[in-house]
Image (tube, helix red, strand yellow):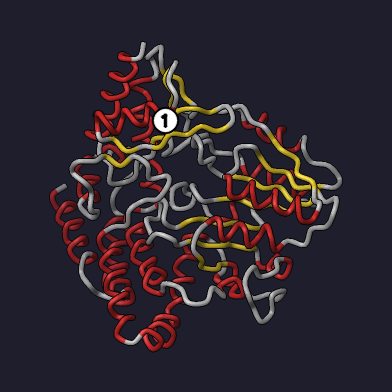
Amino acid sequence: MNSRRGFIKQMFGLSGGILLHSSIEAAVSPYVNQELGQIALSDGLLTEDETYWGTIRQAYNCSPNIINLNNGGVSPSPKSTQDALDNYNRFCNEAPTYYMWRILDQNREPLRYNLSLLAGCSTDEIAINRNATEGLNTIIFGLNLKEGDEVVLCKYDYPNMMNAWKQREKRDNIKLQWVDLSLPNENEEEMIAAYVSAFTPKTKVVHLTHIINWCGQILPVRKIADEAHKRGIEVIVDGAHSFALLDYKIPDTGADYFATSLHKFMCAPFGSGMLYIRKDKIQNIWALLSAEKPDGTDIRKFENLGTRSFASEMAIGYSLDFHNLITTERKQKRLFYLKNYWMEQVKALEEIHFFTSLKPEFSCAIGHFGIKGMKGVDIANQLFADYKIHSVAITHEKIDGVRITPNVYNSLQEMDKLVHAIKEIAEKNK
C-alpha cells in the first residue's frame, strides 16, 4: 500500500510539471503502464479504495466549497492538462504562425495515433475536432440522402442531433421515424425491437445514442447495429457520454460513423472532440467545411477548421496520458460504484423515483432521480442553495428530475453529503 501511494504521488509530481507532451510520454508512460498494471482489479478493492481515489483527486483543482456533480456536461481537466494548455498558449504567443503552424501542427499525427490506440481503430479513421455536436453534424449533413429516404432516431437523442436531422428533413424532404422508449429500461430485447420495428425498406440510417444524456441509459448499440446492417442500413453512434467511460473500442459498437466529446470523461480541454468514420465509408461523407477534396477518402478532410486553438488540441495528450494512468476499466468500475452508492441509500424512500437503472449493463456514472411532487429545477436549486451541490435539472419527454454525474475526483464523503441532502429535501417536501 505504501509503495503504491508513493508511486502515485511521484507520478503526479512528474505530470504536474511543465514538460511538453513528447517528453512526458517518453519518460513516464512505460513506467506508468508497468507499475499500475500490477494493481489487481479482480477483488474489487481498488474501486472502493478512498486512499487511491483521494490521490487521484489531488490531480484536480477541486473546490473545497462546491461539490461538482455535473461532470456529464463538461468535466474539469487535471492539473497537468491545465499546465500544458497554459504553457502551449504562452509558447504560441511568442510567434503564433511559426509555433502553431510549423511546430505544433506537426504533432497532430502523434496525437491521432495515441487516440486511435484507445479507440481501437486505424489512425486513418479518426479526425480531431471540437466536440460530438460538430462531429455528428459533419456526418448528418455530409450523408448523401435524397427525398423520401428514411432515418430512424429516438425522442431521447441529444437536442443538437435531433435539430440537425429536423433541418435535413426540412431542407431535403427526408423522413424521420421516431422511436420512443420507456426509461429506465432493463429489457434489452424490448429496446432492440423498438428500433427494428421502425425500420422499413426506405430506411437508410439509424442514429443511436450510446448513453442517453438525460438519464444515463445505456443502449445495446451493437445488437441494434447488427440488425440494421442485416438490412443494409448505416449506423451512426453518438458516443459523447460513453467514450473514456465504458470499457470498449469504437468498432465494438458496430458504428459506421461515431463522434464523441473529449471534454467529458476524458477530461480533455473544453471544446475538444473526436470523429470516427469507418475507412470504407469516408468517401460517402462530404466535408462540412472547406476541403480540397470534399468527397475524398482522407479522414483529414474533416479537420479544415481554419485557425483553431493549437494549445487546446495539443493538451488533449496530457488528459489521454492521465486517463491511461487510471485505465478505462478502473474508471468505469469506480463511477458505477459511486452512482450506485448514493442511489442504493435513497431508493427505499417513498418520495424518490429513479430514471436510471442500478444494473451495470444499463447504466454507469449518470444517475437521475426525482422527488414526488417536485419539479427537477426546484430540487436542483435546493441542492445548491442549501448544500452547495452543483447538479443539473433535466426535464425532457417523460423525465423530470435531477441528473447526478460524479467523476474520478469525487469522494464517498461527497456522496454521503448528497444522500443526506436528498433525504432532507424529500422529508421537507412530503
Name above or below for residue 217 compared with residue 79.
above
Q: Is residue 79 left or right of residue 236?
A: left
Q: Position of residue 391 (x, y in %)?
A: 36, 37
Amino acid identity at mark 1: Val
Q: Residue at x 29, y 29 (%)?
A: 418
Q: Is residue 59 left or right of residue 110?
A: left
At label 1, counting other C-alpha atoms closer than 10 Å, the crowd grade (few under 14, some 14-19, many 20 or more) is: some
Q: Position of residue 322 (x, y in %)?
A: 32, 59
Does residue 99 show up? yes
Read off the residue under disc 1.
377
Say which of 236 and 328 sits in front: 236
Q: Position of residue 152 (x, y in %)?
A: 73, 44
Does residue 186 show up? no
Specify the quadrant of the image occupied by residue 346.
Answer: top left
Name above or below for residue 266 compared with residue 20.
above
Name above or below for residue 288 compared with residue 76.
below
User: Quarter holding the C terminus?
Assistant: top left
Q: Residue at x 32, y 57 (%)?
A: 77
Q: Residue at x 64, y 68 (%)?
A: 288
Which element is circle 1 on? helix
Say which of 280 and 80 sits in front: 80
Q: Position of residue 123 (x, y in %)?
A: 54, 71
Specify the quadrant of the image occupied by residue 414.
Answer: top left
Q: Is residue 274 left or right of residue 70?
A: right
